[in-house]
Amino acid sequence: MQLLGSKAGFAVDPSSPAAAWVLNNPGSPAAATIKQRIARVPAAHRVAVPEKEVADDIRPYLDAAVGSRAQALLFADADRGAGCPASSGSYRSWSSALAAAVGEQDVIIVLRVSASEPGGRECSTDPRPQVTENVVASLHASTRHARVILDVSDLAAQSVPAVQQFLDSLPLTGLTGIAVNVGGTAPDAQIADTVSKLRRGDLLVVQDSSRSGGDGPPGCNSPQARLGPQLSLSPDAGWVQKIWITTPGVSDGPCGAAPGSKAGEFVPELAVALTR
């Protein structure tokens, strides 16, 4: 199993939070560093808009990927896209809109379906395995060349058995792999230990390495976090595939090194600190 295939690399997102900040703040002393170290690095395009806006949101990025002959990578946050609360049908409808927008294009989709909000509020009256199965089935049936990687970061943070139990409750048809540390700051060594305990040869394991370069404990806007490896891939299913799934510098919320920030806000001071 290979993520890139014949592609030379992943696509750069011209509308990423870092790129947008650089565009709007060209005179800032931080602009050059953020542009070179973050905005120009390939990372997933996050899709978290309502169903009717999905096509307009992703088409510029997908077209740019085709133009540069690069591999498109989407982080599809179905929880935010479908809204909260949402039924299993709402999730499936949102994923159908995503599939229609992707069409026949070769795309890797990192899919988040936790069926809950940060803090634990349930977003669906249906069980998480059922919601996940429906969304994966919808994408698998409607996109011939899309490969789906399921984000299990929240479960991996709880325990390895929690991940195993969840995966055992799902039909794995349509899944290429699972993703861990998405939006997290766990260092590479900790992720490697978690993955070694999973011992799965049937699914690729992908790590969001955008903030995994530090050596301190993971935490909300951890001041010890640093940029991680931009790309480390192997066809070996036992290898941890490292790619940037989230944009470094985007705040986790009012905590850690950015107590006055909001979740999802790009904070240049955070971004620069990650490059040190």
Image (spheres, helix red, strand yellow):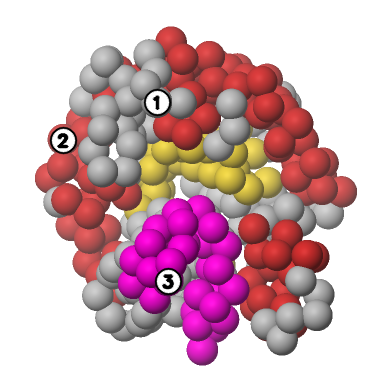
The residue carrying mark 1 is 84
Which label lies toward us, 1 or 2?
1
User: Three-letter amino acid code at disc 2?
Assistant: Gln
Which one is nearer the viewer's eye here, 261 or 244? 261
Question: Where residue 77 sits: x, y (%)?
Answer: 49, 37
Residue 148 seen in this snapshot: no
The residues bearing labels 1 and 2 have C-alpha atoms spaced at a distance of 25 Å
Q: Residues within 10 Å of mark 3 (few under 14, many from 20)?
A: some
Residue 115 seen in this snapshot: yes
Q: Which mark is residue 165?
A: 2
Q: Quadrant of residue 68?
A: bottom right
Taking the image as shown, residue 127 lies to the left or right of residue 244, namely: left
Q: Residues within 10 Å of mark 2 (few under 14, many from 20)?
A: few
Taking the image as shown, residue 197 lies to the left or right of residue 37, namely: left
Q: Residues within 10 Å of mark 1 (few under 14, many from 20)?
A: some
User: Three-letter amino acid code at disc 1?
Assistant: Cys
Residue name at image x 26 percent, y 28 percent: 122
Q: Quadrant of residue 88?
A: top left
Q: Quadrant of residue 107?
A: top right
Residue name at image x 66 percent, y 28 percent: 54
Taking the image as shown, residue 43 lies to the left or right of residue 150, namely: right
Question: Where residue 131 sits: x, y (%)?
Answer: 35, 20
| SS at badge 3 | loop
| SS at badge 1 | loop
Residue 62, relative to residue 40: is it above or below?
Answer: above
The residue carrying mark 3 is 258
Q: Earlier in the sequence, mark 3 or mark 1?
A: 1
Return the residue found at the far top. 89
| Magenta residue span | 249-276
Disc 1 and disc 2 in contact, CB within 8 angstroms = no
Residue name at image x 55 percent, y 37 percent: 48
Magenta span contains residue 268: yes
